[in-house]
Image: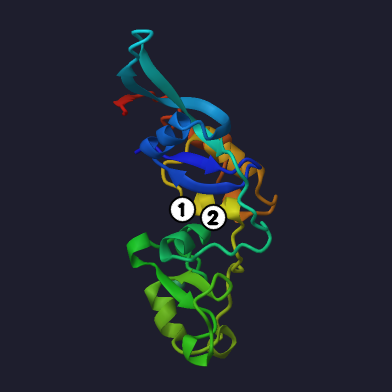
Amino acid sequence: MLHILKLDVGGIPQSWINAEEATKHYAEGSIAWTLGKPVAVMRGGISRLSGKQSVIELHSIIATKGSSRINLFEVIPSITKAKLYKRDQGLCAYCASLINESEAEAEHITPSSKGGCYSWMNLVISCRACNQKKGNRSPENAGMSLMYAPYIPSLYEDMILKGRNILADQMEFLAANLPKNSRLLQNYTATNFLSESSSEVFATDFQ
Ligand SMILES: [Zn+2]
């Protein structure tokens, strides 16, 4: 499934949208600018005047008119276990073993019974064994230390965390806006994404 990165006119990420939603923006003229390669061609009806079929090329990154009026530094992305798993790269925070996503647990550093919340700064990915061993205790009380520190993802990091099949040029745009020490950059090299279907072009009918 093709996902197009939608930005506001200032380049601030808004969401991942599908080809139909992107086509709507092109058709209503709300695109301010685009980046990246055309990734799909949408074919519409035949114009009565010109006798030509209308064609819209979708780019992998689109910016729509209007700005989102958000303060980048104040936004806290919503948290899900899937995003947490990606943030923590599937590694148990206590024994550093690589865990399958289905077996990974979202572990409260400060237990909820002691006032710890379900938040980016209080959650890490843990294997079942470590989670059970730690139980209802703080890491200090359990004598267990964290192998990495939790952090709140930026809006750009959040787009990577919730993205699927991110194309090379989309990743390049998002990566350019990450702090240099972002953990999400550790596994990132441009070539990782080049083999993706970034040049894939398909045609669909639109109204
Ligand atoms: Zn573990």
Q: Amino acid at mark 2?
A: Asp
Residue nearest the observer in this picture, 57 or 36: 57
For label 1, the residue is: 162
Q: Relative to 50, does residue 72 appear above or below in the rendering?
A: below
Estimate the spatial distance between the alpha carbons at disc 2 and disc 1, rounded to whole Å: 6 Å
Compared across the picture, whether 25 is left or right of 122 comes to left
| Residue 170 percent across, percent down from the top left | 53, 37
Q: Amino acid at mark 1?
A: Lys
Which residue extends farthest top? 50
Compared across the picture, whether 145 is left or right of 111 comes to right
Q: Relative to 95, does residue 109 appear above or below in the rendering?
A: below
| Residue 94 percent across, percent down from the top left | 51, 73
Dividing the picture into quarters, in which one does residue 55 lie? top left
For label 2, the residue is: 158
Residue nearest the observer in this picture, 173 or 20: 20
Residue nearest the observer in this picture, 118 or 74: 74
Instruction: Give the residue drawn at x 42%, y 40%.
Output: 3
